[in-house]
Structure formats: C-alpha cells, structure tokens
Image (cartoon, grey):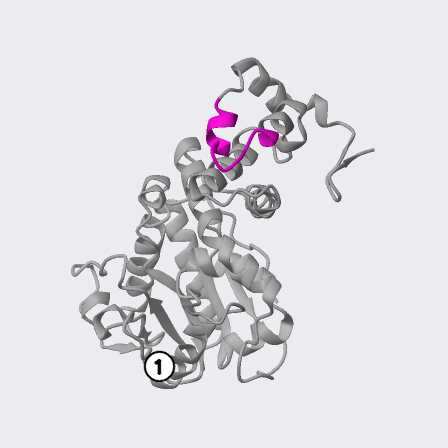
Amino acid sequence: MTYPNLYAPASDTTGPATVETAVVALLGYFRRYPDLQCLLLVDPQPRELPVSGKAKPALAELPRVPLPIEHDAFPEHHRPYLLALDPSASHFDTWLAESVRVALSDRRPDAMARGPGQRIGGWLATSASAEDLAQHLSRHVLQTNDRGATCALRFYDSRAFALLWPMLSLMQRETLLGPVKVWHAFDAGARLRGHAGLYPPMLEHLMLKPEQWAAIRRHGVVNRALALHSNATGRQPDPDDVEAAVAAAVRAEHYGLHQRDDRLAFIGHALDWHPYFDSHPRVIQALGEVSADRFYTAAASELTEQEIDEIRGGAWCAGYNKKNGTRV
C-alpha cells in the first residue's frame, strides 16, 4: 500500500518550509515506532553527499554498508549504500534534516534538468540490520529482462522508484520491501510518501512480467520529459502530469516514434499543450508525415502558434474519449 500524502508541501516544494515539514513527519514516524531503525538509502553515482553539516559526524562520515552488487557496472565506490541513522542518537533530527535537504536539492527543477539523478533513495524503517537489508536489496538490483538482457532496476533512485511502485503487484511490492516496514521517499512531485506492504514477503524474486518491462523501459524518457517540463514551468510535476507523461510514452511507441528526441518531444507536447494533443487533426496530419527520413520533431515544428493555441484551448477535445482514444 502507499500512504496518502499527509504532509502538504509549501508552495516552494524544495525550500526550507518543505524541509522542515518532511523532517517533522519523519521524526513523528520514528518516535511512534521506537523499535524500528532508520536506514538511509544513498546512491553515490550522481555525486557524493556533502562532507560538512551541522551534525558531527556528518552523513558523509557515517559508516557505509554497500549493497553487494557483483557486476562491473557497480564498482565498490559506485554501489548504492545504507547509512544507519539511530533514532535515539542526539543528532538524529540533524541527520534527517541534512538528508532531506540533499534530497530536495536534487529535486530543484534546474537540478533535474541537468539529469544527475537522485542521491537519496529513501528513509527505510526496519528492524533488520543494515547488513541484512543491503543483502536483501542487492538481490533485486540486477534483473534479467524479457529480452534476456541483464539490467539494473534503479529503485534506489527515488524518481525511478516513484514510477516503479505503482506498476508492481502486491506480491512484487512485498518482495521488494522484504524486511522494510515502511519505505519513506519523495514521489514524482517531491511529496514525501510512505510505502508499506500488508503481508510478509511471499516471493524470492520479483518475477517481472513482459508488460512491466515494457513500462520500465519507458521510465527513463518519462522522467527526463518530466524534468524538462519542471524546469520550463518552474514547478514540480503534479499527479496529472505524471499520468499524462506515462500515457503519452505508450502512445509514442504506438505511433512508431523510436528516436529518443522524438519521444521526448511527444511527451513534452502532452505536458505543455494538452494531454491528448495527438487527437487534434493537425497533429494527426503531422504524425502521418513521420517516416524513416522525417522525424516527428520536424513534422511537429511546422505547427503554427495559432494551431498550438487551439490545441492548448482544448475545445476540439470536448468529445474525445480518453479511455480508448475515440470520439464520442
């Protein structure tokens, strides 16, 4: 299950007020459950944690427990790792504040547009040791996809996790969580949420299905399009933005848009113009012009400002059935 967003962020979704709100929420949780420890999931590949902070030792100086991922793409210094933040320690609230500031600094629209990734994967509430949880999580990083290729399931990146979680079945969620009672993380719109299961783990492996792999392969371009849209608008994506981007990525494949720039442009138009912009007659015409020698970006660039304004207005879409893409 996913806990509702109980802590509505301030208008500046990466500023001091939001940091304070998230820290208060996390402190409140761990005070209610003093028998659980807090393990901070960190990905060092974007860049390392800051070496200075109000707490002594700073987060970057705490003992690390790397996820033992045996693959050339994960040399030891690039492996995600866990930091044990002891809720009974005097610096616990300062460690939380430092980690929340890092997480939200990576969510600034300009930071997301640069594409470095997210360093903070979440605050994991568990009774397991950091070593045991690292072993558990490492078993799910390397996956063999439906095409027989080995790939990394990047649940340790909170933006990737935000798209992954909704598409997992109940048993797959339980399997990924393992000994984690609640996985606290910022969602696609930089809202702090808690993700929990209902039952003990029932499977040893996630056993992802082909249609889930198809969705996972879209996650990179979806998150990139959302980051560019966030940078252009100066705000975090809302749930409607995420839904529109995911749906547009599926339709882009349906139209045979295989070039990454074409797919990014198509999803961007769904976010900027209208969620179902591709049902507009002028866009249908442009899509019909796409071929091996003519990209979608070129065809769409010929739309006039007047046509784009009409698409944004949405009056043409009054009778459009969003479920099956037909007029009603």
Left or right: where 172 falls relative to 50: right
Asked whether residue 18 is in view, the answer is yes
Provide the residue designation for mark 1.
Answer: 130
Q: Position of residue 46 (x, y in %)?
A: 27, 57
Give me the residue at 58% from left, 83% from top: 203
Asked whether, in this view, residue 324 is left or right of residue 90, the answer is: right
Q: Percent from the top left, x then y, of residue 294?
A: 48, 31
Q: Residue drawn 37% across and 51% down?
A: 19
Assign the N terminus to one quadrant of the image: bottom right
| Residues in magenta, as a range | 287-301
- Nearer-the-camera pick, 248 or 43: 248
Q: Nearer the viewer, residue 31 or 220?
A: 220
Residue 3 in view: no
Circle 1: residue type: Ala
The x and y percentages for residue 6 are: 55, 55
Quarter residue 245 falls in: top right
Residue positioned 64% across, 72% down in the render: 170
> Looking at the figure, which quarter contains the C terminus?
top right
